Amino acid sequence: MKKIRMILNWSASCGGCDVAILDMGRAILDLPQKVEILYWPVALDFKRKDLEGLKENSVDIGIINGAVRTSEQEEEAKMFRNKCRHIVSFGSCACSGGIPGLANQYDRDDVLKRAFREAQSNVPGETTIPQPLTHVNDVDLTLPEFFKEVKALHHIIPVDSYVPGCPPSLSTIGEFLGSLDAIVKGKVKKNVFASDKALCTECPHGKTRETKKVENLFRPHEIIATGDRCLLDQGIVCLGFATRGGCGARCIRVNMPCRGCYGWLLTMFDPGAEAMSTIASIAGDREDYMPATKIMNVLDKVRDTVGTFYSFSLPCAGIKRKEK
Amino acid sequence: MANKIAIFPNTRLEGHGKVEIFLDDSGNVKDSYFQVIEFRGFEKFCEGRHVEELPRITPKICGVCPGAHHMASSKACDAVYNVEIPETAKKLRELFYNAHIAHSHILHFFALGAPDMLLMNEEPAKRNIFGLVAAVGKDIGIAVVDNRGYAQKIQEIIGGHQTYPVSSLPGGLSKPLEEKDRKEIQKMAKSLVEFSKKSLDIFARLVLQNEKLVEIVASDLYRHETNYAGMVDDNNKVNFYDGMIKVVDPYGKEVCSFEARDYLDHVAEHVEPWSYIKFPYLKNIGWKGFVDGPESGVYRVNSLARLNVADGMATPLAQVAYEKLYSFFGKKPVHNILAYHWARLIELMYAAERIHELASDSSITDTNIRTIPTGDPSEGIAAVEAPRGTLYHHYVTDKKGIVQTVNLIVATVQNNAAINMSVKKAAQNLIKNGEVDDTLLNKVEMAVRAYDPCLACSSHALPGRMPLELKIFWKGEFYKRITYNR
């Protein structure tokens, strides 16, 4: 049988998506029998020239993880699109910006200044900030340009399939790798490798959920959550109700709330806004009889609304990034 | 303009990097630069967050050592709330953390580092984990995958997920360990101890008994005399989770020893406009540029540095392995950068033994694992030894626990200056009269890889990848691009 020709790359990412693929265990050792990998910087020694040398549309599948933040990442994404018949957006960062996308809350220059000038361990009065071009000792050194904002992969190139999750769970990756043949033959039915239903449907506490009003909200460290009830019913903001299933409710199984890494349900326009609306409507028992200050005290537990409701999706949200 | 060689992307590393080498008119190396070419800006966008979310956000700095950020962040959060966590929570965190070190060291040695040593003269398409398995046998390949899998599984049991742990938060952990899981961990730890023995054995057989390799490991080509920093316990033994940070000079003499919360008295960072990561140095000595020796503030971290600052390992088999390393080189500290690989395996042995010790402690299933913080949050600083070196998290919050500022000094950054120096030294010795080929270039890249640099981590200040570019510039123009195609 002809091997599937594949290339993989990482953009503004942490490498966790690549590690997750390695976490497939023994199955990974058999991968070379089925797949010919022609580029994968984290694991193999092919260089940029090898990638450039591939012919247009000569690769079956290109997998990219990470958001797009620099000119170099954009260039490589476009190169992948040109070489590949099918592009896969892999992991939360590629799918919706992910955690690095939270940087869109801040101006680019402030982000650079904080790290290189203002950090406590910098030398007081530090003025240097990394530049796209530096002339040093008679030579020119270049760095890729740091874009104004973080973008998801589909903002840069057309994407054919999405594998969400931070990182995608082993069962999600297993399902995806098991579908490679079908993808190559154009027979794959779905383009998002996750459940079309809310995480609550696969959560061990889904059946205990009462969705009643809660008197108080708690931040996770303020309360010892019991492992037998819906976290939302215990007053802890959990985004399972606004998030696709597919992860196996892994965070909730250790009593920690969902932060939405599997992305939003198709029925939602802006999941952060919808989740915010849901939390606002359940917070504060008998709020009609509550003084405004008490209501504010309850909502004070979600003081960081951006971080609570758009942890993984800010670049794709309805709200815009900060502009000066 | 001088003549330039670029290795790009740097491969089998975590993150994005490149090396540029400039030749003088006669084709010898004039200068070289190791650059990190990406940046994400975590310090800035952690501002405004609920501080207890940082143990979930900061692990996304790095997918290879998320566990290190999870731990450093949780400890910094404990400090922010000034809360003492229960004894069992400490044990569980340390158990989790040693499993994390084991996973990372196995991954680096077998998938990233060992191909350098054992497949040095192979063609690039074979110089990887698949090539290694073909060379040493599928049995070993399976043992590698299985045992790294156990280390991941242990992290999953305690942390909730094998790559992205979530269970540690200010005051302790969110879920106690069940007895059946304790037994399973104990069993996996036994296998990890056996596997560590096997790994040290492979190293002894395939590297130490190979004259050519020994010559390379011991050669001056891959050697720098610098200061070293690492964490030690009360008995001056290597510890990853907690302890004092000790610094020794190139002769092994103690320079200072300090608590993580005093880090600003001892460490500062230099900025260069041509790299997205900074260059930390010892504050007392100062930044003297890219030079080694006792007069320079440059210091190194990661496995070999930890072994160099400590008096030994806290578990028996690791201690035996530790003594072997120092008797091989005949003195301490050891300055040879390829010895970082060996040191990693000795630490793997310690981690495996420590996991077994902790999992054999029946009190570890106690359910008292959380102290609810009652104090007002303010400022917290903490450190752990990440697989790649000391990792500092420093948070300042308002009285509602909303983050005002974050400062992070990650492991790899502290080796940044040394990596630059090592690349230059290797390049100067290997490239003569403009003659250069790709295996030679891999030998330059080996100087980078020995440090197991994590550019994702170091460019937390942007997201991370580490490709290596090598371009040669000679007589004012582009002379040669080296490819690994044959």
Image (cartoon, rainbow, N blue to C red):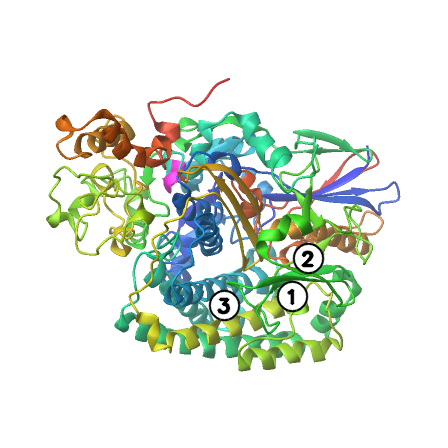
For mark 3, what is the residue?
A: B133
Report in which chain the residue with disc 3 lies: B
Is B462 on the left or on the right of A18, as rendered?
right
Q: Where, by quadrant of the figure, is residue A25 drawn?
A: bottom left
Q: Badge 3: few (under 14), some or many (20 or more) residues near its Cα, within 10 Å?
A: some
Q: Is residue A92 magenta?
A: yes
Circle 2 Cα neighbour tier, 10 Å, few/some/many (<14 / 14–19 / ≥20): many
Residues in magenta, as a range: A89-94
Q: Secondary structure at mark 2?
A: strand
> Could you give the CA–CA distance between mark 3 and mark 2, rounded to whole angstroms?
31 Å
Same subunit: marks 3 and 1: yes
Residue drawn at x 49%, y 56% as measured from the top left = B68
Q: Where residue B472 sits: x, y (%)? A: 74, 41
Q: Residue at x 44, y 52 (%)?
A: B78
Task: State whether discs 3 and 2 lie on one chain.
Answer: yes
- Can you see residue A158? no
Give the spatial CA distance, label 3 vs label 1: 26 Å
Whether pointer 2 and pointer 1 mark residues with C-beta atoms closer than 8 Å, the reply is: yes
Which residue bears the numbered disc 1?
A: B304
Q: Residue at x 27, y 37 (%)?
A: A191
Query: Tag count in the figure?
Result: 3
